[in-house]
Structures are given as structure tokens and as C-alpha cells.
Image: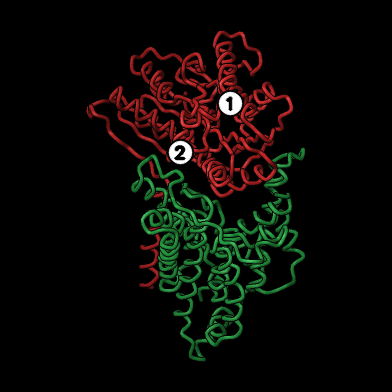
């Protein structure tokens, strides 16, 4: 396998969970809510997939990851929509709760030994013809089914946000909730729905980490991906296409980091590890301007 | 107003839950419940990692079962937490508190004088005091033997090492591994990658896949939970073998883990706990290695057919020379494992 091929394949694998969580967070933020608790949804999804996949198979694992993420969303929505609590503080509490609770539950379910590498993982699904294309084929078209679905979700969400009445209402809720309410939009209902949808996708991202990649659970294995997804939404300027591109940029930079280390270039590894973040900052400066939803993170 | 009050109550409960869940320590009284011999363990990661922290937890259980101690363990990530946890256990009159890793030394040194009746031990530490000991493991010699094995079984002539972060003991172990590989195969190339943390299993897998794409076919990992990702990458690739580390990981994936560099932490912990219980303890740096049967290269019997007999003989003869102190090849100075 050439170095380019391995970089491209690693880019797609790294980008997939970020894209799923990022698209979920995009919908939540377009409704005016910033969900810092997304990290909690990712790790809960990972644990749910670990528990469900051995008896139910990979598909059952993904389903329960979605449900676990949605449950975290219900908790988040209760705080920020029903109780009108500060979004940043509630989200931080939900993220910490998810990280701590999954560790405690993992111990309770499996004991101190854990479940090292016993979870079934999805096979790669080769797309006929396209997977035979040199260089690009193996990297882009020999991926688990969930990767294709994540990448198809971006245009689907673009259609929803910009071409449907519900999408218009959702965006109105994030930009001008008072006007939306006057126009007859059920603002709170949209926000609750957007939070639950976003968290469910965060859970699916956790499912990818276990079912398409690790085959195991480890405490804290979400490793900040929920927070990175929030940054990716800002980098992608709150549009589905932007989030797709931003995930790929971050995935590419991370893949470069792996290859640069493996090639043995004489660089301090700590510097190489910062590569994705440096590249993301550069991209943030170069990216076209775009504004956050006007009512993002506001409780009034 | 009522909504606000209701919220603040709910919020406080959530915070309390989150905090309680984050510090999911565990107390477990021993068989002789009246025992006032209390032992605590602080780990830098989850004890379910099947590696560095799992071995320590087994050691704690051994102390409970053999000496009837009342035990407690807690996972702590930051230096501020290290010190606070040491103080908590000191204040509760624990007899022995073990900080599991190089990184616990500074906190132990600060806290030990304040609780003279408690013995503080840090694994891989080199600080000592009246009630403070370091417990060092010679990881370099068995790492050298693992390197010899890797150099002998590689087909591509490329082997890799993957660590969590570049702690001095990990770096020394990897250097010994590289010397061992070059000892049997002077042309071998050694790739080196660090994941940047000890938890990110997916990143561990990606680091391994990147090395495998560069033709590495034997990988020595020392990355705790993230190391499971390295093993997973080997399972999903053709003809790639990996080494387990810290605990015996041969059974984690018996089809790809060719051997493990194992620290017998239960043995080491029991040794110290016995001294503390019998009041014969004196503060010092305790070095344990292959000669004490504490650190060893353990081959996976299920993959024994993959290792040529002459290579086994050669490794055994170097091991014997090491035990007699007559082998200069590996870094002979005892180096801590973490």
C-alpha cells in the first residue's frame, strides 16, 4: 500500500466519527443550542455499542448507540430547554457525567477485567467498480457501511435545512426565536428535537469508534472527539458542506500525523501530534466568513 | 423563580452525580474484616486496561487475599489529584499507599512527611524517605530479549514500537528493544510512534496501521488501554505480530500476540506489603528484575511454532548471561518501567 493510499484511508476513518458528531451538533446549533455535552453522548454510545453488539450484532450495536446518545440528549434538553439552564454549564456537567458514568457502569457490567477486543466489528463494504480505481479506490470505497452513510448524511441534511419547511423553521428558531414563535413555530419542540437528534448522532460516532475501529471499550476512549466536533461545526461555518470539508481537513491532518511518525522523520513526536490542531487553526483563518446562529447559547 | 430553584436543585444533584461517577474509587474489605491493615492504590488510568493498571489492581487483590488487608483503589489523572488522594488516605490512617507510576513521585515526596505512620510507595520511583520507597523494575533486559525475538521473526526487516507518551522508562525500554532487534538482525529498521495519551484505542489502531503500511510486521506496544488498538490492528492485518506489555497479554489476542513483557506486580506489591505489615519496612529504592522473577519475557505457547528453534536457544543463552550479570548488550542499569 502506498503512503498516499494509507493517508487517504486513515483520513476517511478518522473523519467518520467526527463527521457524524459534527453534523449532529450542526443541527443542534442551528436551533440555537450549543451542546457541550456531546462528548458524553459519544462515550455513552461507545459503551452501549459494546454492550449490545455481542448479542445483537453490529447493526444492533449501532442502534443502541443511537438510543444511548438520544438518552443523553433528553437529559441535556431537560436542562437547557425545560429548565432554561445555562447551556455551557449544563453541557459541561453532562459531558463529565457521561465520562464518569460509563466508567462506573463498565466496571459494574464487566468487572475490573473489562472486555478486551471481544466486540464484533463491521467488515468493509467494497463498492463495485469504484473500489477498483487505483489509489482512490481502496482508500475511499473500501470502508465500513457506516462511513458511506455519514458522508451521504451531509447532502441529506443540506436538503433538509435549505429545501424543507421544517428546515426553515429550525433555522428560524436559531436566528430569531421570538419571530419564529410569533409565526407559529413551536420553538421549544424544535430545540428538544434538535438536541436529541444531535446527541443521537454523537452516540453513533461512539458506535463507530467501537464497531468499525476498536472492537473494544476503554474508559475515556472518546478522547475529546465530542469537543473536536463542536470546533468542526464552527470551522465549517454552520453549513453541512462546511462540516463535511472541515471533518476531512481534520481527518487528513491526523492521518498525516500518523504517517509522519511511521516514516521516522526526525521530528519531536509532540510537535507532530499538534499537526491536526495547527492545520485546523490555519483552515479557520482561511475559511470563508460565516456567522453563528444569532441566538446560539442564549437562554432569554 | 420556582423553575429556577427547581433547576438549581436538579443541577446540584447532576454535578454531585458527575463528580461521584468521575472518581469511581472502590473500597472492599478483606476477609478478616476486623483488620486494621489498610492498603490503597492510586492508578493513572482505568484498571480494566489489561496492562499497567490491571496488573497493579491484581497486586492489590493479592495483598487483600494473602494478608487480609482492607483495600481501596482510585483512578487519578492530574498531579493535584495525586496529592489530594495521598492526603486522604494518610488522614484515614492507611498503612500502605501505592502510587502506581513514575508521575506520582513528587506528590508522594510532598505528602509523606505529614503522615509518618503511613508508608508511601511509588512504582518506577527513585525517591526515598523514612516512610517513602521507590519500586523500580528492570524493563530494559526483557525488552532487549523481545527485540531479539522481533528481529528474528520479522520477514520484512521492519519492526515498530508504539507508546502512549514518551515517559523516560518507556523510551529506555524501546531503545533496549531496538538494540535487541539489531543484535540478531543488523539490517532491521525500527519505526517509533507515540499516541499522545493512554486511552484513545482508535488512535492506537491508526498508529499501528500507519506502521504496517510502512511494512512493519512486528510491533512492540506499551500504551495501556490504547495499546488494545495496536493489537486490534494486528488482528485485522495479515502476518503482523505484536508484543504485549506490563501484564501478560498473550490471551488478549492469542493469534497475534507473540509474547509479553510482563511485570509480576502482585509479587512485587506483596513483597513490600509484607514488610509494612511486619514492621520491618525501611524507606529505600527497591529494584526488581528478571533475577527476582518480577520482570520477564513470556512467550505465547500458541504461537511457539512461529519461532525458529535456534532463535529460542539464542534468546535463552542471552537471558542466562543477563541473569549472571555477564551480558553488556542491554542497558544493564535498572530502569523503571514507568
Q: Which residue is mark 1?
A: B146
- CA separation in Å, label 1 and label 2: 18 Å
Where is residue B277? Give x, y as percent.
34, 18
Q: Which residue is mark 2?
A: B252
* Quarter of the rendering containing residue B34: top left
**Going from the N terminus, do you reach mark 1 or mark 2 first?**
1
The circle on residue B206 is none
* Residue that appears at 56% across and 16% down: B313
In the image, taking residue A54 as reference, residue A4 lies left or right, namely right
The image's colour scheme reads: by chain
- Note whether B53 is above or below A257 in the view shown: above
Chain of the residue displaying label 1: B
- Considering depth in this image, is B92 or B287 the residue closer to the camera? B287
* Quarter of the rendering containing residue B312: top right
10 Å crowding of disc 2: few (<14), some (14-19), many (20+): some
* Residue that appears at 61% across and 37% down: B162
Residue B110 seen: no
* Residue that appears at 67% across and 61% down: A132
Which color is chain A depicted in?
green
* Residue that appears at 61% across and 57% down: A13
Question: Which secondary structure lies at badge 2?
Answer: loop
In the image, taking residue B50 as reference, residue A158 lies left or right, namely right
In the image, taking residue A89 as reference, residue A155 lies left or right, namely right
Where is residue B207? Give x, y as percent.
63, 45
- Considering depth in this image, is B215 or A218 the residue closer to the camera? B215
* Quarter of the rendering containing residue B186: top right
- Note whether B199 is above or below A121 in the view shown: above
Q: Which chain is drawn using red?
A: B
Question: Which secondary structure lies at badge 1?
Answer: helix
Amino acid at each position: 500500500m502506498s503512503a498516499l493510499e494509507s493517508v487517504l484511508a486513515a483520513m476517511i476513518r478518522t473523519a467518520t466519527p467526527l463527521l457524524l458528531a459534527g453534523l449532529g451538533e450542526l443541527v443542534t446549533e442551528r436551533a440555537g443550542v450549543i451542546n457541550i455535552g456531546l462528548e458524553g453522548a459519544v462515550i455513552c454510545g461507545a459503551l452501549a455499542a459494546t454492550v449490545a453488539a455481542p448479542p445483537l450484532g453490529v447493526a444492533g450495536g449501532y442502534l443502541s448507540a443511537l438510543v444511548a446518545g438520544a438518552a443523553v440528549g433528553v437529559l441535556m434538553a431537560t436542562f437547557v430547554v425545560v429548565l432554561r439552564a445555562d447551556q455551557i454549564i449544563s453541557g459541561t456537567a453532562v459531558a463529565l457525567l457521561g465520562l464518569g458514568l460509563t466508567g462506573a457502569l463498565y466496571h459494574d457490567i464487566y468487572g475490573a477485567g473489562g472486555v478486551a477486543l471481544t466486540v464484533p466489528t463491521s467488515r468493509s463494504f467494497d463498492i463495485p467498480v469504484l473500489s477498483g480505481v487505483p489509489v482512490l479506490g481502496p482508500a475511499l470505497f473500501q470502508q465500513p457501511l457506516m462511513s458511506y452513510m455519514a458522508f451521504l448524511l451531509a447532502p441529506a441534511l443540506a436538503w433538509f435545512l435549505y429545501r424543507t419547511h421544517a428546515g426553515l423553521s429550525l433555522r428560524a428558531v436559531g436566528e430569531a426565536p421570538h419571530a419564529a414563535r410569533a409565526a407559529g413555530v413551536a420553538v421549544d419542540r424544535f430545540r428538544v428535537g434538535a438536541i436529541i437528534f444531535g446527541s443521537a448522532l454523537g452516540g453513533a460516532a461512539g458506535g463507530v469508534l467501537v464497531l468499525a475501529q476498536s472492537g473494544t471499550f476503554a474508559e475515556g476512549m472518546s478522547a475529546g472527539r465530542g469537543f473536536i466536533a463542536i470546533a468542526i461545526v464552527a470551522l465549517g461555518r454552520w453549513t453541512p458542506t462546511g462540516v463535511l470539508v472541515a471533518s476531512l481537513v481534520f481527518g487528513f491532518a491526523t492521518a498525516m500525523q500518523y504517517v509522519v511518525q511511521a516514516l521516522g522523520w526526525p521530528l519531536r513526536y509532540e510537535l507532530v501530534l499538534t499537526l491536526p490542531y495547527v492545520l485546523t487553526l490555519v483552515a479557520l483563518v482561511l475559511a470563508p466568513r460565516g456567522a453563528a446562529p444569532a441566538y446560539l447559547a442564549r437562554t432569554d | 423563580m420556582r423553575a429556577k430553584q427547581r433547576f438549581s436543585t436538579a443541577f446540584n444533584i447532576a454535578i454531585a452525580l458527575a463528580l461521584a461517577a468521575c472518581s469511581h474509587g472502590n473500597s472492599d474489605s478483606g476477609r478478616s474484616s476486623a483488620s486494621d491493615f489498610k492498603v490503597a492504590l492510586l492508578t493513572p488510568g482505568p484498571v480494566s486496561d489489561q496492562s499497567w493498571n490491571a496488573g497493579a489492581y491484581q497486586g492489590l487483590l493479592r495483598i487483600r487475599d494473602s494478608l487480609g488487608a482492607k483495600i481501596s483503589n482510585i483512578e487519578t489523572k492530574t498531579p493535584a489529584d495525586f496529592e489530594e488522594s495521598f492526603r486522604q488516605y494518610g488522614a484515614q490512617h492507611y498503612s500502605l499507599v501505592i502510587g502506581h507510576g513514575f508521575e506520582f513521585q513528587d506528590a508522594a515526596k510532598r505528602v509523606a512527611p505529614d503522615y509518618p505512620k503511613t508508608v508511601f510507595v511509588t512504582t518506577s520511583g527513585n525517591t526515598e524517605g523514612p516512610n517513602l520507597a521507590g519500586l523500580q523494575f528492570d524493563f530494559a533486559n526483557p525488552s532487549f530479549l523481545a527485540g531479539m525475538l522481533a528481529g528474528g521473526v520479522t520477514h520484512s526487516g521492519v519492526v515498530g514500537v508504539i507508546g502512549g507518551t514518551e515517559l523516560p522508562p518507556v523510551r529506555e525500554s524501546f531503545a533496549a528493544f531496538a538494540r535487541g532487534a539489531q543484535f540478531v538482525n543488523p539490517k532491521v529498521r525500527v519505526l517509533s510512534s507515540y499516541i499522545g495519551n493512554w486511552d484513545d484505542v482508535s488512535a492506537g489502531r491508526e498508529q499501528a496501521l500507519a506502521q504496517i503500511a510502512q511494512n512493519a510486521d512486528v510491533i512492540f506496544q506499551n500504551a495501556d488501554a490504547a495499546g488494545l488498538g495496536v493489537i486490534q490492528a494486528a488482528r485485522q492485518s495479515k502476518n503482523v505480530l505484536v508484543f504485549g506489555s506490563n501484564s501478560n497479554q498473550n490471551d488478549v489476542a492469542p493469534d497475534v500476540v507473540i509474547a509479553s513483557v510482563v511485570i509480576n506486580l502482585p509479587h512485587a506489591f506483596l513483597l513490600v506489603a509484607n514488610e509494612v505489615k511486619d514492621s520491618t519496612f525501611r524507606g529505600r529504592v527497591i529494584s526488581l528484575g528478571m533475577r527476582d522473577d518480577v520482570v520477564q519475557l513470556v512467550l505465547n505457547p500458541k504461537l511457539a511454532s512461529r519461532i525458529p528453534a535456534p532463535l529460542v536457544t539464542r534468546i535463552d543463552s542471552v537471558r542466562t548471561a543477563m541473569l549472571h550479570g555477564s551480558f553488556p548488550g542491554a542497558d544493564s542499569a535498572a530502569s523503571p518501567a514507568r
